[in-house]
Image (spheres, rainbow, N blue to C red):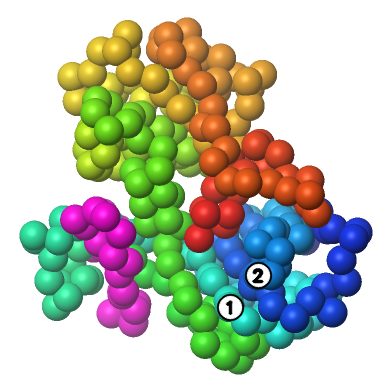
Amino acid sequence: MMVKKLKLKSNHLDLKKIQHKEISIQFSLDGFSFCVFDSDLQEFIIFHKYEFLEKINTPEKLLKKIQQLFITEEILQLKYDKISVIHDNNLSSFVPKALFNKKNLKSYVAFNNKVFNTDYFTFDSLVNQEMNLVYIPYININNFLIDQFGSFNYKHTSSILVENLLNYFTMNDGISFFVHVSKTHFEVIISKNKQLLFFNTFQHQTKEDFIYYILFTVEQLNLNVEQFSLQFLGVIHKESELYQIVHKYIRNVSFLENKLSFNRYLEINDTIIRENFSLFNF
């Protein structure tokens, strides 16, 4: 079973009559989302987000959910000038370019994850950053999307997240500290002078888990909680217990400010952009 968590569509435009349009699609074991961009207007005109209510623990089960959506969602059956696909999983590892070798993709991911001989490995090169993200895409879903659309571009959500934060949201000097929150896990991204200093993904079930890993990271990097500002993005709001407990220990806490220009055709607020950062910044 799945639930449509959010559906936004411009009432001023007929999608079938738009000549030049692009679609970005993101999927994980937790859900599926997509947005449509009008290339002529240079604006987003559709955003849909689905959440899977039951636990999905394999790419095969995820594919079945996505196949169902392609049958019921007429928007996904249209033709697009550009298709961008985002894989969201924890099967990845950042590697400095100085240490990178294409022959060793499997070993990079295997360092932090269980891998199999049948897995397919690829990598994203981050613009303006001397590193690559090596990861395992859900190749069965890629094959399905090839049947639906033909060729498309795809990336891992972590490379989009880190690349955009470092290039557009960090300070030229000093520490920038970001926490990207999902339902069951969160990423900590820390940069110094616009270069990645730290990246890790942590699982959390309680607010105590959440603050423990954040403060553990602060301690390991010898950071002073009085001297940096922590910026949140993802699924978190000011009234949540996660925000409240962090604010007890770290003085300067805020939410990432939107740097995208929105939008006369689609009412997308800063909260939606923060919760779907990679989708809107691909």
Q: Is residue 52 located in the magenta-colored stretch of the structure?
A: no
> Could you tell me how far apart the alpha carbons at marks 2 and 1 are, in whole angstroms?
10 Å
Residue at 56% across / 14% down in the picture?
244
Amino acid type at image mark 1: Lys
| Residue 268 occupies quadrant | top right
Q: Nearer the viewer, residue 123 or 91?
A: 123
Q: Position of residue 156 (x, y in %)?
A: 42, 62
Label at residue 39: 2
Q: Which residues are magenta?
A: 109-134
Residue at 76% across / 61% down in the picture?
46
Confirm or deny contact between disc 2 and disc 1 (CB under 8 A).
Answer: yes
Secondary structure character of the magenta stretch overall: loop
Q: Nearer the viewer, residue 21 or 205?
A: 21
Describe residue 93's horizontal placement relative to residue 36 as left or right: left
Residue at 83% across / 58% down in the picture?
9
Describe residue 39's horizontal placement relative to residue 208 as left or right: right
Sequence-first disc among 2 and 1: 2
Residue 202, visible in the rendered structure: no
Q: Residue tagged by mark 1?
A: 82
Amino acid type at image mark 2: Ser
Furthest residue toward left: 98
Instruction: Examine the rendered structure and indicate whether residue 177 appears above or below residue 41.
Output: above
Disc 1 is placed on an element classified as: strand
| Residue 179 occupies quadrant | top left
